[in-house]
Each structure stands twice: as C-alpha cells, then as structure tokens.
Image: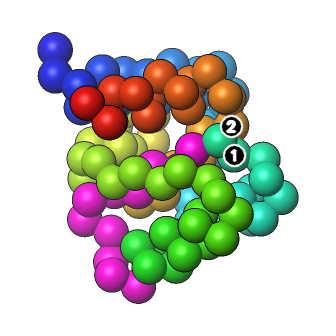
Amino acid sequence: MTNEAKVLSLLGLCQRAGQLISGEELVLDDVRKQNVSLVILASDASANTEKKVKDKCSYYTVPAYMTSDRYALGQAIGKEARVVLGVRSEGFAKKIAALLNQ
C-alpha cells in the first residue's frame, strides 16, 4: 500500500470520526479560528485557490500539503470531488503529515 493510499484511507477514517471538514470557505474559516491542525489541497486545485489556501495557512501557521486529485480526495471521504480538506484532530494530522513527509 502506497503512502498516498494510506493517506486517503486515513482521510476516510477521519471523516467517519467527524474530524474532517471539506470545502474551501469552511476550511479557511476554521483556519482563521485555529480549529484545524492540517490542510490537504488537491494537486489539481486552481492556482488561485492554491495561493489563497497556502497564504492563509502560512499566516496562521497551519501545515498545508498537496496530494492526489480532487476526485480521489472526494472518493476517499465518500463525497463528490473535494479540493480542500481540513483535519481537526491532532492525532490524525500528525499521522497524515508523517506519511506525506516520507
């Protein structure tokens, strides 16, 4: 199982645990409120969305990673295509970050 597959699996678990939010505006709002531990951005996100999310995460010191495409992220959490995901749980965030840093 590749690291990307493990990350997608963890995102699914995170969704079922109620520790995941999706959608650009909802995630950015929670970044401002310091309610997320990690932000996942789809690799096929538009340049404008990527810049906005990365700038906001940088300002509020929330780690942001790019992985998979919008359809894989959406499928992993049992929804339609998703471009931006926010992980609220510190434990899930640490494990996902460790896998993405390998």
Q: Please state if 95 lies on the left or on the right of 42 as rendered.
A: right
Q: Quadrant of residue 4?
A: top left
Q: Amino acid at mark 2?
A: Arg
**Badge 1: how crowded within 10 Å, few (<14), some, or many (20+)?**
many
Judge whether 78 appears above or below 91 on screen.
below
CA gap between label 1 and label 2 equals 4 Å
Judge whether 74 appears above or below 49 on screen.
above
Judge whether 97 appears above or below 42 on screen.
above
Which of these two is toward me, 18 or 30?
A: 30
Residues at badges 1 and 2 in contact (C-beta under 8 Å)?
yes
Which of these two is toward me, 96 or 25?
A: 96
Q: Please state if 50 lies on the left or on the right of 28 as rendered.
A: left
**How many badges with numbers are in the image?**
2
How far across and how far down the image is residue 75, in percent?
Answer: 34, 37
Q: Amino acid at mark 1?
A: Val
In the rendered view, how is the structure colored? Answer: rainbow
Q: Please state if 3 lies on the left or on the right of 77 as rendered.
A: left
Q: Which residue is mark 1?
A: 36
The residue positioned 40% from the left and 73% from the top of the image is 50
Q: Earlier in the sequence, mark 1 or mark 2?
A: 1
Label 1, secondary structure: give it. Answer: loop
Quarter of the image for the C terminus: give it: top left
Asked if one can make out residue 87 in the rendered structure from this viewpoint, the answer is yes
Is residue 6 on the magenta stretch? no
Q: Quadrant of residue 29?
A: bottom right
The residue positioned 69% from the left and 46% from the top of the image is 36
The residue positioned 35% from the left and 43% from the top of the image is 73
Q: Which residue is mark 2?
A: 88
Q: Which residues are magenta?
A: 38-48
**Badge 2: how crowded within 10 Å, few (<14), some, or many (20+)?**
many
